[in-house]
Image (cartoon, rainbow, N blue to C red):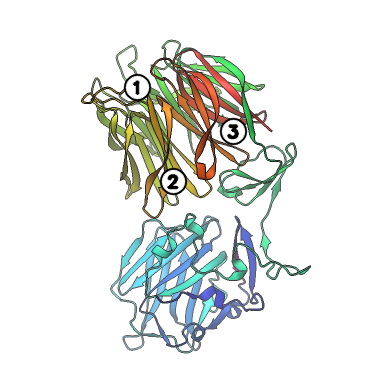
Amino acid sequence: DLRPLDILSEAVPAAGLARGMRVFQVQGVRGFQLSASRPRALAFPASRLFIHCDRFPEEFSIIVTLRALRGPAKRNEYIFTLMVEESPSVLVGLRYGPDKLHFLFWSQERAGGWQTRVTFPNVSLSDNQWHTLVLAVSGQSFSLTVDCSVPKDVVVETPFPASLSVRRASFYLGNRRRRKGVFTGLLRQLVLLPGADATPRICHAVNFKVATLSVPSVLQDVPAKPVSNEVLKYPYETDMKVTLGARPRCSKQEKAQFWFNASRRGLYLCNGSAWLSMLEVQHRLDYVEEHQNLVTNSETMGVEVFSIPKVGLFAAMANRVTPPGSAIYRWTDGKFVHYQNIPTYQAQSWKYFTIGKKIFLAVANFEQNERGQEFSVIYKWSRRKAKFVAYQRLTTHSARDWEAFVIEGEAFLAVVNHREGNNHNIDSVIYRWNPRTGLFETNQTIPTSGAYDWEFFTIGPYSFLAVANTFNGTSTKIYSHIYIWLSGSFQLFQSILTFGAADWEVFHIGDRVFLAVANSHSYDSGMPAPSNFYAINSSIYELNITAQMFVKFQDLLTYSALDWEFFSVGDDSFLVVANSFDGFTFSVNSIIYRWQGYEGFVAAHHLPTVGCRDWEAFHTAEGSFLFYSSAKEPLSKVLKLKTT
């Protein structure tokens, strides 16, 4: 029940900023830049915080939100110190160095006292990103949580003192009372919480990296409104940059930068992954029209649309018949044109991914080759040949899908094995990239049942992998599983009952996280046959942060659904489902659902399709498009989204 002690706010005068302080806004978040020339100006007596007692708490948490400069730090930099005026010793302090964080305290239990340093290794903060740290101290135990990830625990021989006097001591922000070791980044939050571990109070937020317990008013997101024609009470600086011309990339490096699109008269803001419209005549989806009929080598089980930098936009088709195998098309003059053929064996899907500067395309083969060998192949883009060439073969068993992802800087590739012979209950495999050999190697196997799809996603610092289990040999009414990455491997997080699950699709609407499953059919050898195996609800689940699980949000009637695709037009969000068979015919409408807030997803457009297997949404200079593949005829279609 003890109140937080806001160290940072105490250093800010009521009338404005202290000398040696400047306010900067980076990536949409404000923080203090501290001057090295006036370290004593950034100090205040500890008695202003410890009003009724001149002892430092025995148990406490320190919460810090900061942004350290990119690049390896060549020296230690102090976040804060607590020092007695006449002594050079640090009573309590926090500093960081190259990939380390040090907590310092002074123990006076012996004559003369001594300095104790608690070191947390492998703490990387110097990446130009905002981070929130929670340091919890209790006796000999010290625990550090960075961005609400797994805590780093350290136990030392010397406990934090039970009675540390702060008489005649002062807090110093970003220094230890001298110019050497001054903090060079931005500081947003510095709070002392006596008697409690602050992690639960911080880690309920969606944006963990800038979660706050207490922030000075000058740094709060909404500035004080000026009265009449007054200027802002707290002016601040920002590294704002406006880019003109064609759509630039939007990544963490471009976060909080602007792009002006002259052709659409729009101003956009990069949020770290996508351009958000700030000023624009908002487009709304009016109707869908046929743009291109693409005759394919054979029926198409899946399509992957991807862009190779400085080369162009491509679509890889997973074609059923061999020969001629599967085809890759290139977007040329507003249409897809045949570019390359690749030998495949009843290909089910493609996955495009990159590792550093290397560009790869993996195919999931369902059948054996002419020699009776069963494997799927990873192809690598050859810049010299401007083609994809075979790079690595991996043994698979009726592979349905590949998923590529990165965790903690390491690259992974997961394959879904559907069955081996008539046995559907087999292992699917997660491979880890070995940078030394330049090959993927087995990292983990996960039991699956007739699986169709992997879906990787992240929520805050946590990584998840969902598998769509389809058939266990007797029933399609089985559990599909969501796994969470913990301690170097995926572990079961949640199981959800599905009915011939063929696809998972994760998507975000605002701060809400959803997961949609495509249920293909309901069959159980031990139960009476239903009137229609294929007319069945597919479900959308929403993450409940409090319960730490996905809960059902909405059911939608589908007809042997095989895929979901999420896309946006202007401020509107949509889901399109691949309905493949209604029990009588493969000529069945696939449906675009529009997000209607409280109503959930509501059917907006009915699209005639034949054996629809996969949807892909993509954008070009010509507009926004949907691409659907047919598993029942050698014809796929590109549809254009017409907006008003």
Farthest residue to the right: give it.
229
Q: Amino acid at mark 2?
A: Thr
Tell us which disc is closer to us: 2 or 3. Answer: 2
Q: Quadrant of the C terminus?
A: top right
Q: CA distance from mark 1 to mark 3?
A: 47 Å
Main SS of the magenta part reads strand
The image quadrant of residue 346 is: top left
User: Type of residue at label 3?
Assistant: Pro
Q: Which mark is residue 458?
A: 2
Q: Secondary structure at mark 3?
A: loop
In 3D space, how far apart are the residues under numbered discs 1 and 2 (Cα atoms)? 36 Å
Depth order, front residue of 254/609 = 609
Badge 1 element: loop
Q: Is residue 33 rendered magenta in the image?
A: yes
For the point 49% across and 34% down, which residue is it? 358
Could you tell me how far apart the alpha carbons at marks 2 and 3 are, in whole angstroms? 25 Å
Q: Is residue 229 visible?
A: yes
Per the image, the residue denoted by label 3 is: 309
| Numbered range of the magenta stretch | 31-35
Q: Which element type, helix, strand or loop, lies under badge 2?
A: strand
Q: Residues within 10 Å of mark 2 (few under 14, many from 20)?
A: few
* Residue 628 image position (x, y, % from top left): 52, 23
Image position of 637 with respect to 257: above or below: above
Residue 500 point in image, percent of width and height: 33, 28
Q: Residue at image x 49%, y 84%? A: 46
Residue occupied by mark 1: 532
